[in-house]
Amino acid sequence: MTAIVIENLGRSFVTTTGTIRRTQKTVTALDNVSLTVEPGELFGLLGPNGAGKTTLTRILSTVLLPSSGRAEVLGLDVVRDAKQLRPRIGMVYGGERGLYWRLSGRDNIQYFADLYLVPPEVSRKRIPELLELVGLKDRAEERVEGYSRGMKQRLHIARGLINDPDVLFLDEPTIGLDPIAARELRTVIADLHNAGKTIFLTSHYMYEVDALCQRVAVVNKGQIVMMDTPAALKQLVANLEVVEVECLSVSSEAINRLRDHPRVEAVHVDNRDQVQVLQIQAPGGVKYVPEFLHLLDGANIQKVVTRQPTLEDAYVKLLGKDAISV
């Protein structure tokens, strides 16, 4: 049985704009999305903020209703069979929502075990195992309000596993975490996948998806732009070199001059604190560095490096101006 089947799925919202003259506007969050996920697969949904990733995840986890199309998880329709499906899936959102801060880590997991009607004899064994899995065994009796953000997110993972779900949905689980906490959480996710869990992961972190996922769907403005393995996506930019130019200031006119260069395929601007990093994709890019710098005349250039393309560069090529800094 295919773990997840999505056919022509759509979701629209009606929102109100304006202060004095208020008007209604229809926003399309998902537009005719179709995909499948196999049992035991770690599938990634990659896209910028507002692309529709969370909307799709919430529909699959029976939190939202679709406007059109259909979706099945474990052979159960997410609308018609929601009651039967919910005990068999787990859902983890990024951020700090969904925990009770005045309770201990152990009591939080016990509370959700009771909500899922996990038998006491099962929860007594499973809760310590989950706390050990996410590295919180020694902090289990402390109140969650004293946990770091990374610890809270690991507790979210334990909460999402309390019912031993067949499919686990992870919606940007490492968002806002420091690099060490994010790496620890990725290790937990990889261990779960190696243990046979089917995992549906959304993210806008290229490294995370490249390191964890077997297949990836790139989504933008509610539509799937491409779906394949991370290695296949990187083949889109296999013939390119990337020139990174670090500047303190660069004008939009200079960036447009770069984009108009006959050898340049894409230019992505990444704002990092007070510095702008221009990522210029071009075949044989290193040969054209002097020309690129000439086009940036007037910019305060700090550093220039060349490198081979990554999944992030494939993402930029696919999305163009809609790609965001990561």
Image (spheres, rainbow, N blue to C red):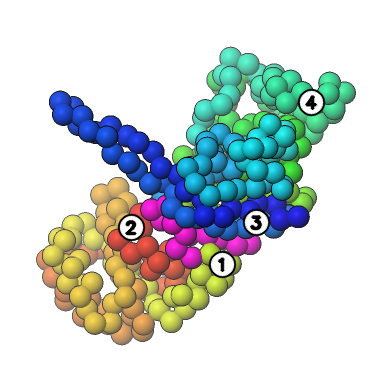
Between discs 1 and 4, the one toward the N terminus: 4
The residue closer to the viewer here, 239 or 272, is 239
Q: Residue at label 4?
A: 118
What is the CA distance from the residue labelled 3 to the residue labelled 4?
A: 27 Å
Q: Residue at x 64, y 37 (%)?
A: 80
What is the CA distance from the residue labelled 1 to the residue labelled 4?
A: 37 Å
**At label 1, which amino acid type do we have?**
Asp
**Left or right position of 326 against 70:** left
**Residue 235 in picture, x, y percent from top left:** 50, 76
**Residue 36 in picture, x, y percent from top left:** 62, 58
**Residue 283 visible (yes or no):** yes
Q: Nearer the viewer, mark 3 or mark 4?
A: 3
**At label 2, which amino acid type do we have?**
Asp
**Residue 325 in picture, x, y percent from top left:** 36, 54
Task: Give the magenta-colored segment's residue range.
Answer: 211-226
What is the CA distance from the residue labelled 3 to the residue labelled 2?
A: 26 Å
**At label 4, which amino acid type do we have?**
Val
Q: Residue at x 63, y 62 (%)?
A: 214
Q: Residue at label 3?
A: 37
